[in-house]
């Protein structure tokens, strides 16, 4: 098992998402400005599977509030693969639109390179979000310990509260691409 040094850098690419947030006029009353309008940061780890989509839907429905910002994070083995980047960008654009339509939240997206569990924890450490939401395949405890699991790694190593969503029957088996 390889250790990730605290100071170690990792590669990432920002994903340009369409601007969906309308321009809002400044508040008319002084009491409307201030801290209560400030939202939270919520990291949602996504991939192209149905369990990830189920976790995204759950987070948008149950956690997100009006002023929050969702940070979509997708871990890949190589950033140089343009096919994966374009497919992930299309997925993140679709999810950003859905998040705005459902919860009216701002979305920021980033594709990171490296081992999924480690880079998700690094992103959580960088952003200091209110929560890190991710899906899981719903494997048994023995299988997840023996085979390894991104959710299991984040559960033990993230300094922010990880929320691991176990798939329901409605998640299905199909990919979201």
Image (cartoon, rainbow, N blue to C red):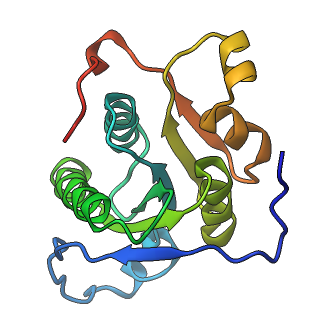
Q: Residue at x 17, y 57 (%)?
A: 97
Q: Which residue corresponds to the image point at 48% horizontal and 22% vertical from the top-left?
A: 137
Q: Using the image as rendered, state which of residue 176 and residue 166 is in the foreground.
A: 176
Would residue 40 be visible to someone looking at this image? no
Where residue 92 sits, quadrant-wise, is bottom left
Vertical comparison of 8 with 100: above or below: below
Please give left or right for residue 118 compared with residue 26 in the image: right
Image position, residue 150 (x, y; %): 61, 38
The quarter of the picture where the N terminus appears is top right
**Residue 176 appears in which quarter of the rendering?**
top left
Residue 118 lies, in percent from the top left, at 68, 54
Camera-nearest residue between 18 and 27: 18
147 or 14: nearer the eye?
A: 147
Answer with left or right where residue 123 lies relative to residue 135: right
Q: Is residue 35 above or below residue 136?
A: below
The residue at the point 45 percent across, 58 percent down is 73
Q: Is residue 68 visible?
A: yes
Q: For the C terminus, give its image quadrant.
A: top left
Left or right position of 177 against 41: left
How far across and down, in percent of the image, does residue 13 sit? 42, 76
Task: Judge from the rendering whether residue 142 lies leftward or rightward of residue 163; answer left or right.
Answer: right
The image shows a total of numbered marks equal to: 0
141 versus 30 height, above or below: above
- On screen, 119 above or below 82? above
Give x and y (percent) for residue 54: 34, 31
């Amino acid at each position: 098992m390889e250790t990730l040094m605290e100071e170690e850098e990792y590669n990432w690419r920002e994903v340009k998402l369409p601007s969906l947030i309308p321009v809002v006029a400044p508040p008319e009353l002084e009491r409307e400005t201030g801290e209560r309008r400030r939202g939270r940061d919520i990291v949602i780890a996504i991939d192209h599977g149905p369990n990830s989509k189920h976790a995204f839907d759950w987070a948008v429905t149950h956690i997100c509030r009006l002023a929050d910002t969702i940070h979509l994070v997708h871990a890949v083995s190589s950033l140089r693969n343009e096919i994966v980047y374009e497919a992930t960008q299309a997925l993140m654009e679709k999810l950003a639109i859905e998040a705005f339509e459902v919860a009216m939240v701002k979305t920021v997206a980033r594709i990171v390179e490296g081992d999924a569990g480690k880079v998700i924890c690094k992103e959580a450490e960088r952003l200091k979000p209110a929560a890190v939401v991710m899906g899981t395949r719903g494997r048994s405890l023995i299988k997840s310990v023996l085979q390894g699991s991104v959710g299991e790694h984040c559960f033990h190593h993230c300094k922010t509260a990880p929320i691991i969503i176990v798939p329901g029957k409605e998640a299905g088996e199909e990919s979201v691409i």
